[in-house]
Amino acid sequence: MFKAIVGASTFQDALDSVSVLVDECKIRLNEEELSIRAVDPANVGMVDLTLEAAAFESYEADGGVIGVNLARLEDIAGMANSGDLIHLELDEETRKLHISIDGLSYTLALIDPDSIRQEPDIPDLDLAAEIVVEGAQIDRGIKAADMVSDHIRLRVDEADEAFFIEAEGDTDDVDLELTREDLIALTAGPADSLFSLDYLKDMNKAIPGDAEVTIELGEEFPVKLHYGFAEGLGHATYMLAPRIQSD
């Protein structure tokens, strides 16, 4: 059983944060929250998303799981204006999702959840550094790095208490230094890892510019990025595997 009404912008934000990595996913319709966990086909990037029942205008669910084509669901949600309400109801017999938006009705065929990739386990990592930064600063660093390279280096200088976003190209280099004053918070620890810029660019598309983003970072470890949306009732975590640097 699943029946819910949600603000269009909240639903669009939730879908955006997952669709930057995968085309289809399982949605867990838990009693207290809707949740999605998925890994991209190359096993490099992962997303873990929850949207609490309180983020909805109304929400009833009993713990089922549905499989959806995200691109199609996003297209439907995209027909709504930001102030519209989206009505969602699961038809148990036909296993279809009925969606209605301001007079427009759509019936979405679902995918068998068993045919969708296994949901990943989130590894428990002890990452030495934690940086809390505005989404807009990450966006700035990623755009600058994209001008010179397809890799991006994230590191923390413990002595200077600063966070660096760097990229080295064949001819040009770029370096964004964010000191403690530029950051919302910093727990300095040994942290220096290289990542695929394409993945971070995709993740960055979903991160609101005004979001407080917590970055957990280590030495040649995956990076974790967490942020909230929907007035703190939605939570998204990305995890990205590093590119191991060869000497």
Image (cartoon, grey):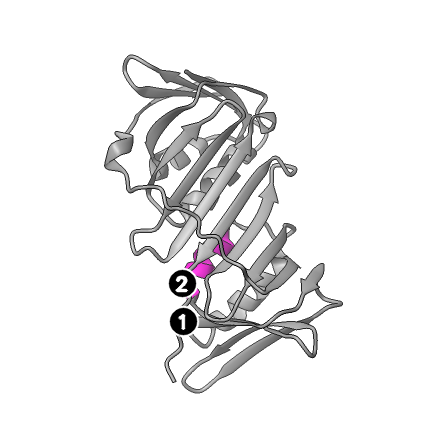
Residue topped by disc 2: 198
Q: Earlier in the sequence, mark 1 or mark 2?
A: 1
Residue 221 x, y percent position in the rendering? 46, 65
Q: Main secondary structure of the magenta part?
A: helix
Question: Which numbered tag is attached to residue 150?
Answer: 1
For disc 1, the neighbor class at 10 Å (few under 14, some 14 to 19, many from 20) is some
Left or right relative to 173: residue 176? right
Q: Is residue 73 left or right of residue 115?
A: right
| Residue found at x 62% / y 69% | 189
| Secondary element at tag 1 | loop
Give the residue at x 54% y 64%.
217
Q: Which amino acid, mark 1?
A: Asp
Spatial CA span between label 1 and label 2: 7 Å
What SS does tag 2 mark?
Answer: helix
Q: Is residue 94 above or below residue 245?
A: above
Residue ID at (44%, 48%): 122
Q: Which mark is residue 22?
A: none
Which stretch did the figure color magenta?
A: 197-205
Tell me the quarter of the image containing the N terminus: top left
Give x and y (percent) for residue 24: 32, 39
Q: Quadrant of residue 235?
A: top right
Q: Nearer the viewer, residue 222 or 53?
A: 222
User: As shown in the figure, which amino acid type bears the numbered disc 2?
Assistant: Asp
* In the image, residue 40 lies in the stretch drawn in magenta: no
Query: Which residue occupies 41% across, 36% down?
Result: 74
Q: Position of residue 82 (x, y in %)?
A: 56, 33
Image coordinates for residue 246, horizontal then vertical, percent: 37, 80
Quadrant in which the C terminus is drawn? bottom left
Please indicate whether residue 120 sits to the left or right of residue 133 in the image.
left
Residue 122 versus residue 70 in the image, above or below:
below
The answer to whether the residue labelled 1 contacts the one labelled 2, judged by CB atoms less than 8 Å apart, is yes
